[in-house]
Image (cartoon, helix red, strand yellow):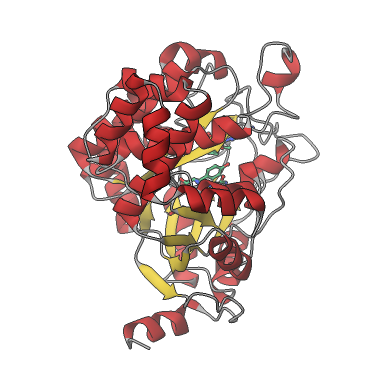
Amino acid sequence: MNAFLSSKLSLNSNAELERLLCQASADTRRILRKSLVGQELTEEEAITLFSGDGIDYRALLATADQVRKNRCGDTGSFVITRNINFTNVCYMGCTFCNFSKEKDDAEAEFISFDEIADRAEEAWQRGATEVCVQGGLHPDIDKDFYRNVLIAIKRRVPDIHIHAFSPFEIWYGAKKARMTPEVFLRDLKQHGLGSMPGTAAEILAEDTRRKLTKNKLTTAEWVRIIKAAHSVGVPTTSTIMYGHVDTAADWAYHLRLLRDIQKETGGFTEFVPLGFIHYETPLYKADPQNVRTGPTREEHFRMHAVARLMLQGHIDNIQASWVKMGPAVAAQMLRSGANDLGGTLMNESISRAAGGQHGQEVTAQDMVANIEAAGFHPVQRNTLYQTVRDYPQHNHKVSVSTPASLITLVESGV
Ligand SMILES: C[S@@+](CC[C@H](N)C(=O)[O-])C[C@H]1O[C@@H](n2cnc3c(N)ncnc32)[C@H](O)[C@@H]1O
Ligand SMILES: Nc1c(NC[C@H](O)[C@H](O)[C@H](O)CO)[nH]c(=O)[nH]c1=O
Ligand SMILES: N[C@@H](Cc1ccc(O)cc1)C(=O)O
Ligand code: SF4
């Protein structure tokens, strides 16, 4: 175990937490004590926590670790999933995105329904319970396209969970089909849509959102699609993309808005902070003096910790994204508020296109090893956080078999 993790482990004792709280500033201490007894924090209190330094910062992380323990115990989870990015052609021009290409670009891609089904089948054979399907808003996408993606996958792999289409893609498809989001989503659900990624959220505070994208759906439209999904029984994740031209006030506003939605609908399964990958993006290249180079390590810690405290009792799954931070740093987040390491992914292309350097895949075995190294009990979950496979601690070298056999094992109580 590395020095950082072992020092954080000792932080987990209540005596250490008490000592930090005693040394923290009065305001921070008051706010953290509220969290420890399960009380709700205000947006202003979140801003205070985002800005604290020194002991206040360490007390924040230790409190988030304790609240995570209260809410989730010592289980660290992950999901075996494959990303299928069916096209990178997109003219929406979000400046933080280097994944999108023009139609006649040499790197432009728009894979066939057969290829989508092939990838899903291969994923299933490799043990995936989920495919995560998203793409650019290709101009040739017609009103039946999204439904046909679902049909193609389900025909080939009927039991795989389809986690697909961001709120922006749903907005686009519903417009093409001239349907309300509710009618459009109900139809997709009937054709096998299991849940939706809560991407396209980026930063929901409007002033900053406008600096990131001109053509993307507005905050009101994002909220409208998310609520429509929840109202027809399609759960979604929730995300933030942070570390560029955003502020702590934007983060606090974003978390409060997600919490308000969750109080109304209960449809969010998790919150995933997505650190901005800057290298190849137009946003960064156009103004390197004023655009941050993604979150600092400290900002990653703050985000996961404050999210845990702001969302407790409402969204209790906080996912750390290894794609954005790398597996080692993502595992450290488990000691500062997060309880999940997300998907194995198999093919990651969005972050790589922006210059991300953490590869395409983390195998199930490596997920288990990372979770154990952080002092947690590893569990393979499905998209909806039900246990698929429970790994006895200190026994992470077992090989991963297919989901069918895993589910049989779980069901028969073996
Ligand atoms: C690439 S889009 C695909 C779905 C759809 N085109 C959309 O925008 O909703 C999925 C998400 O990737 C994330 N993303 C894109 N570029 C990124 C970058 N440079 N760093 C971090 N996340 C990024 C954004 O949060 C975005 O909503
Ligand atoms: N976090 C990222 C993901 N996540 C996929 C999820 O792990 C999974 O689909 C979800 O947890 C469902 O419950 N995919 C990426 O390509 N990049 C990420 O940063
Ligand atoms: N983690 C997101 C999906 C996602 C996919 C690609 C990304 O670049 C970012 C996020 C979700 O499941 O909701
Ligand atoms: S983030 Fe999505 S909508 Fe925006 S340019 Fe990239 S692929 Fe297109």
Compared with 40, 163 (above or below) is below
Residue 169 appearing in the image: no
- At x 37%, y 69%, the residue is 387
Measuring from the top left, give residue 17's x and y in whole percent. Answer: 40, 42
Q: Establish if 114 lies above or below 233.
A: below
Report whether 235 appears left or right of 88.
Answer: left
Answer above or below: position of 64 versus 290. Answer: below
The residue positioned 72% from the left and 12% from the top of the image is 287
Residue 30 left/right relative to 138: left
Q: Residue 2 is drawn in which quadrant?
A: bottom right
- Residue 6 locus on image (x, y percent): 58, 54
Q: Quadrant of residue 159?
A: bottom left
The reply, left or right, for residue 320 in relation to residue 38 is: right
Q: Quadrant of the N terminus?
A: bottom right
Residue 134 on image: x %, y % = 53, 46
Total residue callouts:
0
Q: Nearer the viewer, residue 86 or 297?
A: 297
